[in-house]
Amino acid sequence: MPVQFLGIAATNDGSETTPRSGPAFDKEYTLRLAAAHEEHGWDRVLFAYGSGSPDPAPAAAYIASRLDRLGILLAHRPNVSYPTFAAKTFATLDRISEGRLTVHFITGGNDHEQRREGDTLTKDQRYARTHEYIEIVKKIWTTRKPFDHEGEHYRFHDFVSDVFPVQQPRPDVSFGGSSPAAYAAGGAEADIYCLWGEPLARTAQQIEAVKTAAKVAGRLHPPRIQVAFRPIIAPTEQAAWEKAHRTVGAIKERRAKGEPLGRRRYTAEPENAGSQRLLAIAEAGERYDRALWTPTAAATGGAGNSNALVGTPETVAQALLDYYDLGVDILSARGYDLLQDAVDFGRYVIPLVREKVAERDAARTPRGTHNLAVVGG
């Protein structure tokens, strides 16, 4: 299967290493960054969600109305709107983008962050709510007759939408998480299951957990798998590693000053299983497999997608192919200089990976049989 690449649709130029230079929603930068992704071979970009961040839906609509090919992955947290409203928003955005929308549902792994917008449910309750929410949204997208819903978290009567997606029967649904509750919900409902970059052996275990959850839910086909990394590339291995250490130094310096690292303002130990896993992996070792490097995750406190792949474009491309061979179809990547790194990754890494994937597909190389030896872990 052809591989796909997901980048980031940031609304300003700030990152973990550099404070933003302008407002939270910088209209010109948002378009310039998205256009750079479209021009350099990326398939779609993620419009992320944060409690105090610019609303990703109108930002995505802005980009969709100005670019012709780039796909949109819209992050959405169920606590912020009723599913009847959200389903119409998504369908309208799919119309604006002419069928380029995927929706990523975020359950929320931090109680403090959730309470900022009035969400006081426990994590397990949130996963149950997200499961119900996705079921409702899918039904609204695909049902032309009014229907009632009486659920644990939502109740409504005689609802039918008058706007439907371009994509038929519906847009894809994306979901992530590393806890048993996440595997159960995502395994049942997701078309794409999203993981943060971990060593190959651990990633293989997570893929099996997702497949098992999908089977338990009665699905004939499991979700496609997406894995996210922070690539740090340079023309030589030495230059790449020097760049990697400068990157971690900049993160540590900003954190020591008490500066927020992007949208992350958490001060407590992480509550979500994904971040806990990243920190445990970092504590066990700095380098794994071909190019995985964990100090970036350790420096941010395991905040989100934070494990790096370090090396030349050829090294990073081969590392990504290792994950493809495990069964990963979608590779998510985001640098620290968002614009320039998107250009460099698209120019030097994406073509190498696509070429090798095409060769594998032509040769029908069996997938899921990769050597999982760990180096330096």
Image: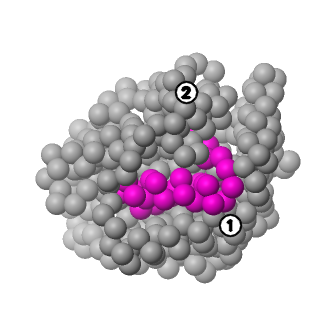
Q: Position of residue 331 (x, y in %)?
A: 50, 58
Q: Position of residue 113 (x, y in %)?
A: 55, 31
Residue drawn where x is 68% and y is 75% of the image = 39
Q: Position of residue 121 (x, y in %)?
A: 38, 28
Q: Residues within 10 Å of mark 2 (few under 14, many from 20)?
A: some
Q: Quadrant of residue 181?
A: top left
Seen from the viewer's position, the closer of residues 85 and 138 is: 138
Residue 86 is covered by the magenta coloring? no
Q: Which residues are magenta?
A: 306-334
Seen from the viewer's position, the closer of residues 121 and 341 is: 341
Q: Which residue is mark 1?
A: 348
- State how far apart marks 2 and 1 are (Cα): 28 Å
Q: Regarding mark 1 in the picture, which secondary structure is present there?
A: helix
Residue drawn where x is 28% and y is 53% of the image = 189
Q: Regarding mark 2 in the picture, which secondary structure is present there?
A: loop
Discs 2, 1 touching: Cβ within 8 Å: no
Q: Position of residue 365 (x, y in %)?
A: 34, 67
- Given the image, on which type of amino acid does mark 1 rest? Tyr
Q: Quadrant of residue 60?
A: bottom right
Above-or-below relation of 293 to 96? above
